[in-house]
Image (cartoon, coloured by chain):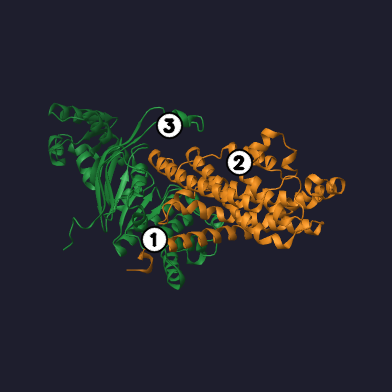
Chain colours: A green, B orange
Amino acid sequence: MTNKVNDARIVVDELTKIYEPTPLWMRALVRTNIKEPVHALNGASFTVRSGEIAAVVGPNGAGKTTTFKILAGLTTPTTGTARVMGFDPIKQSVQVRRSIGWMPGDHRSLLMRHSALDNMRFHGRLQGMSGPSMMRRIRETLEMVGLERRARSNGFSLSAGMLARLQLARAMLHEPEVLILDEPTGAVDPVAAHDLIQLIKEIVAETGIAVLISSHRLEEIETLDSRVLLMDEGRVRYDGRLDDLRRLWDKPTFEIDFRSAGVADAAAQSLLNAGFAGVSRKEATISVALQDGVTHSDLLTRLRDQIEDVTNLRETRRPLQAVLAELYRTKASAE
Amino acid sequence: MSAAKKPMTTTQAVFATATSFFRVDLIEEINYPISFAMRLLGIVAPLLPFFFISKLVGNSPEVGGDYMTFTVIGLALTALLSTAMNGFGITLQRAFQRGTMETFLVEPVPWTVIPLAMNQWQVMNGLLYTAMLIGTGWILGANYVLAGVPAALLIGVLGVIAGMSIGIVSAAVLLLTLKSTPVIRVYDIAASLLAGSIFSVGQLPGWAQALSAILPHTYVINGIRTALMANPGSYEVSLSGAVTALVIFDVVVFAFGIWLWRRTLEYSRKMGLLSGY
């Protein structure tokens, strides 16, 4: 049986980060917009275990990138702790950087005037790889992302989708224990993004690597079928499965078409009289937002007088984006 | 455990970083051969006017009676020091602008080594430019005392370290501002003037000569003139004086540069400036 505690590869505990305003003496050298402290993280906590994908979702300024940068050692937390494979990203920076595969969203992080092979070789050497074993691993990794035939193509001749796959190959080259992907599909089209997400899922299934990924595209998060960390204002608002989130927050709407607007109106009145909430009518169609504890059967039983005039029935679900927006609003107002 | 998981020793990390960045810069240079050739031409072309000027003022005692050799050495070493000094700023700013800096910093190699490795190509270019200028000067009639070559090489190496030390200080400032400051360019021009790259320091007014005495450029250019010229002119810097001044400068400014670089790196990390531009 897997030891859940020891299996934790990323542990973030009550992390806060305050970006202080640029000091006066520095403003002579650089223009700045930060005049007051910016609270990028306000006590974020989560754990990612081996073989797990944790998708970080949240609006701009939610604290996603700051969290990632703290984990990679690129910035320091104000309070709280972060651990990658048990190492402190600041005090044991080199060990952390050896343990993670880093993929920023911007493909400019590649050496664009160099070939895919040269990019891989450069990264491999800095990771302490060399000789035939490095070349073998480069071939394997390029093959894994489907770029083995483009190994000698330089960055400028690769499509955005290929560049994203090359970045993923680079991040995986040194066989890291943790993969940190900051909006990896940001620059690619939906089809290439879907392929990349599938590839990430395959890699996790095959290697058991822990993945922390951020994305603005909710359809991608659904494709990942993973654990979701909803971040907002520097906190983790929700940590769990997307399906559970839907069940908790999404109340489906039941739509019923009738033969005429008159019958629909009578049906709506009947439901309102019976105490159903969230009933509305548009021409010959009524919509009912199903509240907790109310079943389809309850609804249809109440409409028994109009049932023969029903021409169509359907259940609609709100877009995930709307569910998340409501969740953010509700949690924010509760605080 | 895979080969990739074996931790590197510091020596291995330094070697891997140096060779990796060297290879990357070499490949980039090979991709643009015409640009490289034109740059070399641009370096040696300014010697031609001095060839004709030397016909006019060549026998002045101020320049040791050999203005061509005097100027070739001055220009060659100014180019070398300028490249060593500005290389850091150029490569660092390029990495920030291209977006590669963040990826470099996520590699498991010491952060102090990265800018040094990034600058090595610029220093090598500087050495090549210097060799080209010295060689072209010789073709145009410059005369060198071959017995002084070892001393000249020693002073040259100390000069490169001095230039790099100033470059590290400048790069530390760039890390905070994310933009190269004009201060280093102003210093570069002022130093080449005050060190007497194309005229004797003895021609300068007293206050300027006092400023000149605190610049490493003065000891590099005039020390090498002493080593390579039969008569270095009216402003002569002894070899031992040049070496002593440069060693002191290198130790103090290099140590300060590395300290400042580390401090600004930590500060930039705290302020979240490391991966933005």
Q: Secondary structure at mark 3?
A: loop
Look at the picture and state if A274 lies above or below B202. Answer: above
Chain ID, mark 1: A
x and y percentages locating residue A4 in the rendered image: 18, 56
Q: Nearer the viewer, mark 3 or mark 2?
A: 2
Estimate how packed mark 2 is, as few (under 14), some (14 to 19) or many (20 or more) residues with alpha carbons within 10 Å: few
Name the quadrant containing residue B26.
Answer: bottom right
Chain ID, mark 2: B
Q: Nearer the viewer, mark 2 or mark 1?
A: 2
Q: Secondary structure at mark 1?
A: helix
Tags 3 and 1 both on a single chain: yes
Chain ID, mark 3: A
Look at the picture and state if A103 lies above or below A235. Answer: below
Q: Tell which residue pokes out farthest to the bottom in this image.
A: A132
Q: Which residue is mark 2?
A: B214
Observer-nearest residue: A279 or A173? A173
Instruction: Measure the alpha-carbon separation of dots 3 and 2.
Output: 34 Å
Among the two numbered marks 3 and 1 on one chain, the one whose residue lies closer to the N terminus? 3
Left or right side of B97 for A239: left
* Numbered mark located on residue B230 in the image: none
Left or right side of A316 for B259: right
Residue type marked 1: Met
Q: Which residue is mark 1?
A: A172
Label pair 2/1, CB-CB below 8 angstroms = no
Observer-nearest residue: A213 or A266? A213
Residue type marked 3: Thr
Q: Secondary structure at mark 2?
A: loop
* Numbered mark located on residue A22 in the image: 3
